[in-house]
Image: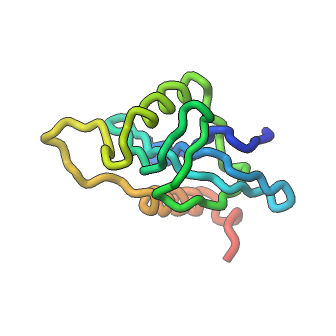
Amino acid sequence: MTLVTGQIVFLECRQTRLYAEVIQVLALRPTGWIRPLALVSETEMIALGADFDATSLTATKPAVPDMLWPLEQLQPALDTEVIPLLASLSAKSPNSASVLPPDSDRRHLTVNEFVQWLWADRQASDPSSFHD
């Protein structure tokens, strides 16, 4: 699998996906810089505050810091996932966080919590793949 700059990818953990844009691929280290765009679960989509330019398909002015991530853990998003996601992100203002009913719990999963879950789950399933 070869990832390219501008491609939309995701990480998945506990029925939640973190969608991100590939900013740069560092082939020598097999890692890539990714810019988080949205956390998506069955019940909500949390736009991560980037100003999204649908005409150029790139996120600008990120509200969540870019991340350096191992390439083998990134999954390319399918066009059928990306098109509705891009439409939703371009329609959302950075402050409209989710699509939840008004009476639902207002505490949302953060990128930090998602990353902690992801690393804990992956370390528990394959401790030899992580180095101190």
Q: Quadrant of the N terminus?
A: top right
Q: Residue at coordinates 58% horizontally, 57% vertically from top-left?
A: 122
Count of picture labels: 0
Q: Which quarter of the picture shows residue 129? A: bottom right
Residue 78 higher or lower than 39, as above or below: above
Left or right of 53? Residue 1 is: right
Q: Quadrant of the C terminus?
A: bottom right
Q: Residue at coordinates 68% horizontally, 41% vertically from top-left?
A: 6
Q: Position of residue 128 (x, y in %)?
A: 70, 65
Q: Residue at coordinates 54% horizontally, 38% vertically from top-left?
A: 53
Foreground of the two, 38 or 72? 38
Q: How is the image coloured?
A: rainbow
Foreground of the two, 80 or 73? 80
Q: Residue furthest left?
A: 103
Q: Residue at coordinates 46% horizontally, 28% vertically from top-left?
A: 87
Q: Residue furthest right?
A: 28
Left or right of 4? Residue 76 is: left
Residue 48 higher or lower than 75, as above or below: below
Q: Position of residue 95 (x, y in %)?
A: 32, 49
Left or right of 60? Residue 22 is: right
Q: Position of residue 78 (x, y in %)?
A: 61, 28
Foreground of the two, 99 or 51? 51
Q: Residue furthest bottom?
A: 132
Q: Position of residue 8 (x, y in %)?
A: 62, 38
Foreground of the two, 87 or 29? 87
